[in-house]
Amino acid sequence: MVTLSNAHIIIEKHIAESIFLNLAHVNWVYYPRRAVLLIAPATDEIFKSLHKTAMSVLKYRNKHGDRSISIRELLLDNEIDSSDRNLGYLADEKMKILNIYFGSNSCGVLLP
């Protein structure tokens, strides 16, 4: 599960481990037209060269091993609803990219 909580993206342990391994930094880019946030390990030089990325710390959120990324500035700059909620996502384990959808017509894994 991927959620938005208190202006942080919360990523469950099994998702975070499959995409980011045990890395402490990620690169991300937000595409407003598609309302999608793409996140990849900071070690992915191809992702960084293809997108105009920002780097963030991927912090441990709790004792279960869930991880979090602060996106307060992204929410404000793009006038995204900051209410706490579950988010649609697609975890591409082969490409090591996490797609997170903010739009109403989001695709990927939609939660019940």
Image: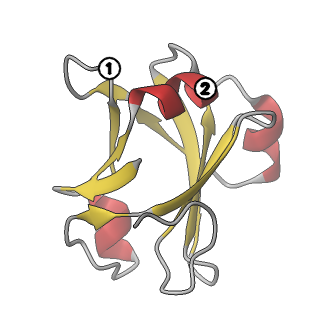
| Residue located at (39% from left, 35% from top) | 12
| Residue located at (57% from left, 77% from top) | 106
CA distance separating discs 1 and 2: 12 Å
| 90 on left or right of 93 | left
Rendered location of residue 4, percent (x, y): 29, 58
| 5 on left or right of 87 | left
- Residue occupied by mark 1: 65
As helix, strand or loop, the secondary structure at mark 1 comes to loop
Q: Amino acid at mark 2?
A: Ser
Q: Quadrant of residue 80?
A: bottom left
Pick the front one: 93 or 35:
93
Question: Label 2: how many residues lie within 10 Å, few (<14), some (14-19) or many (20+)?
Answer: some
In the picture, the quarter occupied by the C terminus is bottom left
Rendered location of residue 29, percent (x, y): 59, 56
Question: Label 1: how many residues lie within 10 Å, few (<14), some (14-19) or many (20+)?
Answer: some
Residue 79 in the image: above or below residue 8 = below
| Residue located at (58% from left, 68% from top) | 36
Rendered location of residue 77, percent (x, y): 36, 74
| 65 on left or right of 27 | left
As helix, strand or loop, the secondary structure at mark 2 comes to helix
Residue 30 in the image: above or below residue 97 = below
| Residue located at (56% from left, 48% from top) | 28
Q: Amino acid at mark 1?
A: Gly
Rendered location of residue 1, percent (x, y): 41, 47
Residue 29 in the image: above or below residue 79 = above
Q: Earlier in the sequence, mark 1 or mark 2?
A: 2
What colouring method underlies this structural image? Answer: secondary structure
Q: Quadrant of residue 89?
A: bottom right
Residue 32's disc is none
Pick the front one: 13 or 28:
13
- Residue occupied by mark 2: 18
